[in-house]
Image: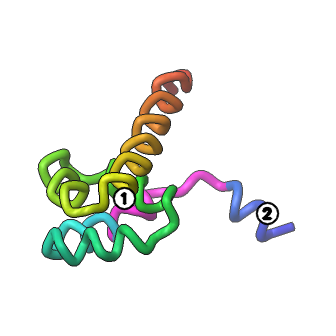
């Protein structure tokens, strides 16, 4: 149906997470860490990996070590998955 066609279409323009990433980056690191800790782990990792390393590390530094390690692991897994995909 139409919804399937729309869902499968390649998004044009900026990535959907870009505006969310900018919002998290604009927050104070303590506030951002508190919010990221409550997000779905995959979403939190995706947002952090789209941030500049300096900004992401300020947030990760304020997370509980167990959560920081889990998110870091998800971020690393995404990097490995992206490296395996053929370039277009």
> Callout 1: 10 Å neighbours few (<14), some, many (20+)?
many
**Proximity of marks 2 and 1: CB atoms separated by less than 8 Å:** no
SS type, badge 2: helix
- Magenta span of residues: 9-19
Q: Quadrant of residue 28?
A: bottom left
**Figure quadrant of residue 14:** bottom left
Residue 64, above or below 29: above
Nearer to us in this view, 62 or 16: 62
Say which quarter of the image contains residue 75.
top left
Query: Quick one: label 2 or label 1, which is nearer the N terminus?
Result: 2
For the point 36% across and 68% down, the residue is: 36
**Does the magenta run of residues contain 46?**
no
Task: Estimate the x, y position of residue 25 in percent, counting from the top left.
Answer: 20, 66
Q: Quadrant of the N terminus?
A: bottom right
Q: Find residue 55 and name its label.
A: none
Labelled disc at residue 4: 2
Q: In front of the other: label 2 or label 1?
A: 1
Q: Secondary structure at mark 1?
A: helix
Instruction: Provide residue 39's location: percent of width, then percent of height.
Output: 45, 70
Residue matched to label 1: 47
Horizontal side, residue 17 vs residue 40: left or right: left
| Residue name at image x 41 percent, y 35 percent | 76
Determine the residue positioned at 47% across, 38% down. 78
């Amino acid at each position: 149906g139409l919804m399937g066609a729309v869902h499968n279409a390649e998004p044009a323009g900026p990535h959907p997470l870009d505006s969310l990433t900018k919002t998290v980056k604009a927050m104070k690191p303590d506030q951002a860490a508190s919010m990221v800790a409550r997000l779905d782990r995959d979403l939190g990792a995706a947002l952090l990996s789209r941030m500049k390393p300096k900004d992401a590390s300020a947030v990760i530094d304020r997370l509980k070590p167990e959560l920081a390690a889990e998110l870091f692991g998800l971020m690393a897994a995404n990097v490995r998955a992206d490296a395996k995909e053929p370039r277009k």
